[in-house]
Amino acid sequence: MKRLLIAGLAALALTSSAWADGDAAAGATVFAQCSACHAVGAGAQNSVGPVLNGVVGRPAGTYPSYRYSSAMRKSGLTWDEATLTQYLKGPDKLVPGSKMIFPGIASDTDLANVIAFLKQQKAE
């Protein structure tokens, strides 16, 4: 009985951890709403918004050859998970004057998933 309880608790911990880290496959679906302006993957190019390969860990306003707003260039932000979560909930709240016109992602699950997806998009 004790082994069963320990195995159950271990499975619960793994499930909770996986949820906290997000589901990259589900994040690819969430990213579909971002793809109108942003690209990822091999051969991605700037469009209305900058390429998001390697965005996690990158200082804001620094992707090559993209013309950022002054607000974004001067924001001093680095795109870690916490900052991306806050920004993607309401871009204009975190960086007023940004060029990104997007109402935000309300669902915490969708936010975790899209960030997990972005974490897989390595810089080229």
Image (tube, helix red, strand yellow):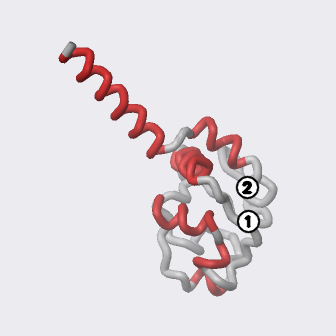
Image location of residue 72, percent across then percent down: 61, 79
Image location of residue 26, percent across then percent down: 63, 38
Q: Identify the residue at horizontal 66%, vertical 41% (top origin).
A: 28
Contact flag, marks 1 and 2 (Cβ < 8 Å): yes
Neighbor class of circle 2 (other Cα within 10 Å; few <14, some 14-19, many 20+) is: some
Image location of residue 79, percent across then percent down: 50, 65
Residue in the foreground of this view, choosing between 3 and 62: 3
Image location of residue 33, percent across then percent down: 76, 52
Image quadrant in which the N terminus is located:
top left
Could you say which quadrant of the image residue 90 lies in?
Answer: bottom right
Q: Which mark is residue 49?
A: 1
Could you say which quadrant of the image residue 113 lies in?
Answer: top right
Q: Identify the residue at horizontal 62%, vertical 65% (top origin).
A: 89
Say if residue 112 shows up in the picture.
Answer: yes
Q: Which dot, 1 or 2, sits closer to the camera?
A: 2
Residue in the foreground of this view, choosing between 58 and 77: 77
Q: Identify the residue at horizontal 32%, vertical 23% (top origin).
A: 8
Q: Which mark is residue 34?
A: 2
Residue in the foreground of this view, choosing between 117 and 110: 110
Q: Which mark is residue 61?
A: none
Say if residue 124 shows up in the picture.
Answer: no
Q: Is residue 101 above or below residue 44?
A: below
